[in-house]
Each structure stands twice: as C-alpha cells, then as structure tokens.
Image: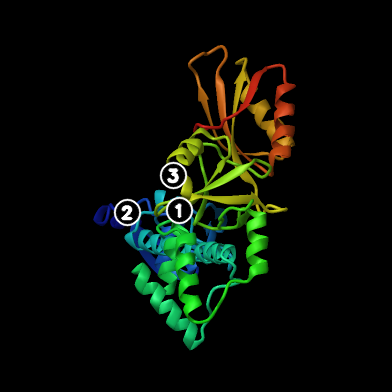
Amino acid sequence: WDHVKVDLYPDAVYVFTPKSRILALPRGATVVDFAYAIHSDVGDRATAGRINGETVPLRTELRNGDVVQVITDAQAVPNVAWLSFVRTGRARSKIRHHLKTQEQTASEALGHTLLTQALRAEGLQQLPGDTDADQAVWERLLRFTGSRTKADLLTDIGLGKRIANMVAKRLVLLLAEQGVRPDAVLLSRERLAAGDSATQGVLQLDGSEGASVRYAPCCRPIPGDPIVGYLGRGEGLAIHVGTCSVAQRLLHRDSERFLQVEWADEASRPFEVGVTVSIHNGRGVLARIAAQLAEQDADIVHVEMDDISPEMPQLRFVLAVRDTAHLEAVTRTLKRAPYVVQVQRAIGQRA
C-alpha cells in the first residue's frame, strides 16, 4: 500500500495520529505542519514532536507511515523561524496571523507606556479612563490624529508612526477644556528628573518587551551597556549601544525620535552579543573554544569562519550572555588560551 501511495501521489506523505487517523500532507512537511493540520491551538502551543515514540525537533520532516504526536506547552507561542521550514499554506497563514497579532498587542502596550510617560512630563498622572467625559476626550483626540480606535492610536505610537509627546500635548489641551489641570508638583519633578527639558520619560528594559522592542543587530546591546532608544517610523523601538555608529548617524539626522531608555535591575533572559576571535588555526581549535564557552555558561547562537587568512582565521560568534560582566569573564577566559590571538566585541557590524 505504501508503494502504491508513493506511485499515485509522489508529492504527498501519509502519516497517522496516535488514534490512527490518517493525514495527507505535502512531501517535506514537518511536525509543525502536522500540528496545524490537527488544530490551530495545537500548532500555536507546539514545542516538540514524537514520531514513532521518539522525541524529535519541530522542524523534523515526516515520512510515509509515521505515527506523529505533538508535544505542547500552554506558555509556548509560534516562532518566526518556523516560517523557514513549514510546507503547508495553513501552517504558514496561522503562524503569520499569530505573529502579527502578537506584534500589535506588544506595540499597543508600548504605545500605552510611552503616551503615559509623555503625559506625566506634561504634569498629568495617567491617561483618561472610561467615563463618558473621558470617552468624549478620546473621540476628539482620535479625530485629531485620524485614528479609528484608541487601540489603533496606541499601536501607532508603539510602532513609531506617531510621536507620543505630540499626542500628549494635544491631550493636555483637550483635558484642560474639561477642567483638568496639570499637577504642578508632578510637572516640576518630571522636569527636574529630565534636566529641565521635555521628555517622554525613561523606559526600563529587561528583555521581555515583546515584538515592539528590538535590540539592534548592528551593535547587539546587552545589560550593562549605555543604551539609547530610536523610535523608527513603523518599526517600533530599536535599542542601540550609545556609541554605535548607526545610532550616532540616526541621532544626527532624527534626534526627536530618540527616547530615554535604561536597563531594569534584573534581566528576564540572556542577550545576544557579537564576538570576533582571531586564532592560530589547528586541529580541534574550534571544539576547544566551544568547550571554554560552555564552561563560562555562554551559549553559541551562531558561528562562522572568515578564512581570508588560513593561518590566522577569524571566528565570528553570536553568543548569549547575561550582561557585560558575564561577557568580560568570557573574554578573559578566551584570551588566556594559547591558540587565541585576539578577542573583540563586534559593534557597528553584524557578527
């Protein structure tokens, strides 16, 4: 029967669910394709697969006759990397829909934070609420900005399509017509904290901000670095190392789009950083460097070799580290190795 199916339908694979239900999928389909063929919720929460009783990664391709089970986690979410290996239109569509919804939710939350901070800089404690009078203020603000809903307005602010302090100034005028006046104490405190200049407030970052905040790949900032935030038009908030040449060019050209940002006391996850290691080439050198990195609890996210000089090649790593102190410890360890010539952090270029 398998031979007949392959002859009749060479572009399809037939697999079984644990309850012996047969599913036909395109040849090259993966565990993720199978998960979305079962149900959207199964696909969205997939973390791994089990094929014929053996646990496998989500990108594993299915073969005729496989019995496939999906391992899920209630906290799991789709990953943009899945789009590189799924084969079915259904899976691709569902992943893109979830990622877009996730990005909009994150951008709306960031927009709410930015607008609240900008309003505090104008002497008002919080955004209007849900009373009839407040709703009237929101409606007038939406007419002024041209946004359809409050969520759309906040999302646009989070994406950088609108500047929060400009919207806040208009909101202050509308609230003044309702008899709401700025708090002189709050206004003085905010301006003092900002060095007597207008500000949108300081946004604290710990790595859990979601899709609306991205850490620029040109400099790969990590906790401990001095950082700046650039609110690109429609791109959300990009975080750069303060000395990054890309950030300096943007600051010269578009300074009004920079926000004050700082690291939270504790990060929620490791951060990626670029490191270039020049070595004396020899048998097993890469394996020894990988072992040293593992000993220092630094995960290798990506590595490639520049073989322009075969005797002294460069290894370009992207490592996951906790902060600048962790990176310094990793760097010291590598420099002590006799086969390592130089170790540099890569800033201002993609590692």
CB of mark 1 within 8 Å of CB of mark 2? no
How many labels, in total?
3
User: Is residue 142 shown to the viewer in this render?
Assistant: yes
Q: State the residue at coordinates (60%, 16%).
A: 281
Left or right: 135, with 295 as reference point? left
Secondary structure of the residue carrying tag 2 is helix
Q: Amino acid at mark 3?
A: Asp
Q: Is residue 293 above or below residue 161?
A: above
Secondary structure of the residue carrying tag 1 is helix
Name the residue carrying label 3: 254
Name the residue carrying label 2: 3
User: Label 3 vs label 2: CA separation?
Assistant: 64 Å
Q: Residue 200 in the image: x percent, y percent?
A: 55, 58
Q: Earlier in the sequence, mark 1 or mark 3?
A: 1
Q: State the residue at coordinates (41%, 73%).
A: 141
Q: Please rate how many residues cluster around mark 2, counting C-alpha atoms within 10 Å: few if below 14, some from 14 to 19, many from 20.
A: few
Q: Earlier in the sequence, mark 3 or mark 2?
A: 2
Q: Residue 147 in the image: x percent, y percent?
A: 36, 70
Q: Amino acid at mark 2?
A: His
Name the residue carrying label 1: 80
User: Label 1 vs label 2: CA separation?
Assistant: 36 Å
Residue ranking furthest to the bottom: 132
